[in-house]
Amino acid sequence: QVQLVESGGGSVQAGGSLRLSCAASGSIFSFRAMGWYRQAPGKQRELVATITSVGNTNYADSVKGRFTISRDNAKYTVSLQMNSLKPEDTAVYYCNAHIVLQNFQDMEYWGKGTLVTVSS
């Protein structure tokens, strides 16, 4: 019914920047909260940043001041601007969205993930 497709991952040196984007498609009526999570090798998936339907944001302490989440409700996209990247930011990043479908069901979806590698 709904697909989330991430893009923008890659390899970068410490101190560099990357921008992740997530585009949703399908039988969408509206979006609720959207966000980015990440999972490093051998670790549990953790929250990176979330943004509500009205633009309120929440960040993990480890990324505050470096990452910025934004959304475009008209284009069904959520983005994550990542600056001053550190090797510990290396992980697979997943897009997450709470979506109201056209049949008014409230569902949660995940993207397949995009790899971010930061070298020292």
Image: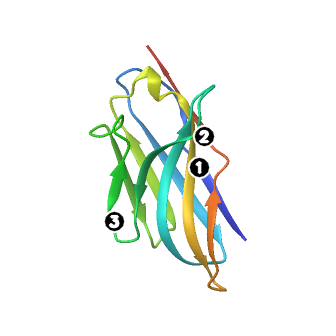
Residue placed most toward the observer, 39 or 2: 39
Give the residue type that dot 1 points to: Glu
Q: Is residue 117 above or below residue 59?
A: above
Residue at image point 57% right, 40% down? 45
- Among numbered discs 1 and 3, the one appearing first in the sequence: 1
Callout 1 secondary element: strand
The residue under label 2 is: 114
The residue under label 3 is: 55
The answer to whether marks 3 and 2 mark residues whose Cβ atoms lie closer than 8 Å is no
The answer to whether marks 1 and 2 mark residues whose Cβ atoms lie closer than 8 Å is yes
Callout 3 secondary element: loop
- Among numbered discs 1 and 2, the one appearing first in the sequence: 1
Residue placed most toward the observer, 98 or 80: 98
Residue at image point 56% right, 56% down? 96
| Mark 1 vs mark 3, CA separation in Å | 20 Å
Residue at image point 63% right, 25% down? 42
Q: Is residue 84 left or right of residue 24?
A: left
Image x and y of residue 49, in percent? 41, 49
Q: Is residue 29 left or right of residue 119?
A: right
Q: Quadrant of residue 72?
A: bottom left
Give the residue type that dot 3 points to: Gly
Image x and y of residue 63, in percent? 35, 37
The answer to whether marks 1 and 3 mark residues whose Cβ atoms lie closer than 8 Å is no
